[in-house]
Amino acid sequence: MILLTSMAVHAQAAWDLNDVTYLMPLPQTVGGDGLLKLESPARGGALLPVSMVNQLPVLAIDRTRPEVNSTLRVMAVRIDPCFPLPTPQSCQRQIRLAWQPIEMNRRNEVQTVDAALHSFYVLQDWEFANLLKEIDAWKSKHSVNTKYLPLQVHPAWAAEKDSSVALADFYKIILKYAGIENFSRVTAMVLRGNGDMWAFAGFEPRNNKLELLPIPRLNRLSQSFINMAVPADHFSGGGISPIPKGDDTFNNLAAESIRMGEGTEDTIRQEVRAAFRIENPKFFNPENMDCVSCHVAQPAIHWVLNKRPDLQVEKLWSQEIYGNPKYDLKNTSVEIWNTQQIRALGYFGKNVAISQRVINESAEVADFINRITAPKSEE
């Protein structure tokens, strides 16, 4: 086991949510925008080579592969000192990038397509320590204040958007530490059907070929979610497939919430408990929880909160709900109730979409970095 506690770095201030998870601005145009692209020059070559992306399913079936590739942009960056591979005790230092295609809507505004890639880059201990130092120096240079702010479009570039000098300088750091040289994994959320079916899969590069990874809890290579609800304030017409087994599941809620009426209160209580636990990184991590359950837990919880307030599930399951008073865990997503908004981090159309799971994970990551960067006390 590698002892990360040896990576002490003198930080100017405590690390907060927006210091470990960086949400990019929506650009003002498509094509001439300032966001990172697949072929952006990075460590060892392209950031995410088209040759790799072309081995994945097309993200949206109403677009050609070249159209998708040319409009894929990095919409979020995450740093993580301890991703649970191969185990939570012996883990990886990572940079992770969330990608979405962007397009112009009918009002001539930039928006995202509801599909995504998530690329992973592994760093050595000393590289991660240097990454933290460079981010710390970047914060000082641009007078970035993130203290006790909820996760949001990063304050360093919220005003100037993709023309921000701070954003350009931040990209220089990321491109130095992430690229094809240390690319280790990519996951995909593809859009199918009439925009009401999402399919998930993960891949690892082996000899320049991407090979499918088994999905936790399923031992299957892909998973999907269908929700045909109109309006999108409930679940209808599909659900999770294949369904995960065990106690921490909410398959009934996610399939046909209209059936969860009088007489199903015990089922609702148990399934919302599962969703609260899935959002809590102290119980589950990406290596032991299936894709759809992670992505759909938030709208499942909010369906119960909105439709069955009489059950008072937040009080009932307060011990299962993640809390951390050191950070503002408020969710700034615009349509947190929307049962078809299952983005973990990025945008739903032109609206910010962040899952509570990502917010909670960011708090855990910030805690970890604050521990390893704390000045050593003199004895």
Image (spheres, helix red, strand yellow):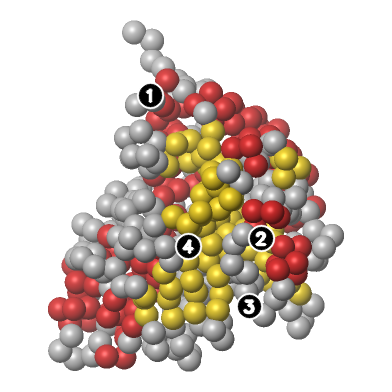
Q: Residues at badges 2 and 3 in contact (C-beta under 8 Å)? A: no
Alpha-carbon neighbours of circle 2 within 10 Å: few (<14), some, or many (≥20)? few
- Image point 71% across, 55% down: which residue? 50
Q: Which of marks 2 and 4 is in front?
A: 2
- Who comes first in sequence, dot 2 or dot 4? 2
Where is mark 3, residue-wise?
Answer: 61
- Left or right, 135 with respect to 323, comes to right
Residue at mark 1 to residue at mark 3: CA–CA distance? 45 Å
Q: Can residue 241 be seen in this view?
A: yes
Amino acid bearing label 4: Ala
- Residue toward you, 40 or 183: 183
Q: Position of residue 295 (x, y in %)?
A: 42, 66
Q: Where is residue 6 in the image (x, y as percent from the top left)?
A: 42, 20
Q: Is 53 rendered above or below residue 138?
A: below
Where is mark 2, residue-wise?
Answer: 54
Alpha-carbon neighbours of circle 4 within 10 Å: few (<14), some, or many (≥20)? many
Q: Nearer the viewer, mark 2 or mark 3?
A: 2
| SS at mark 1 in the image | loop
Q: Is residue 152 visible?
A: no
Q: Residue 201 carries which label?
A: 4
- Image point 43% across, 73% down: which residue? 224
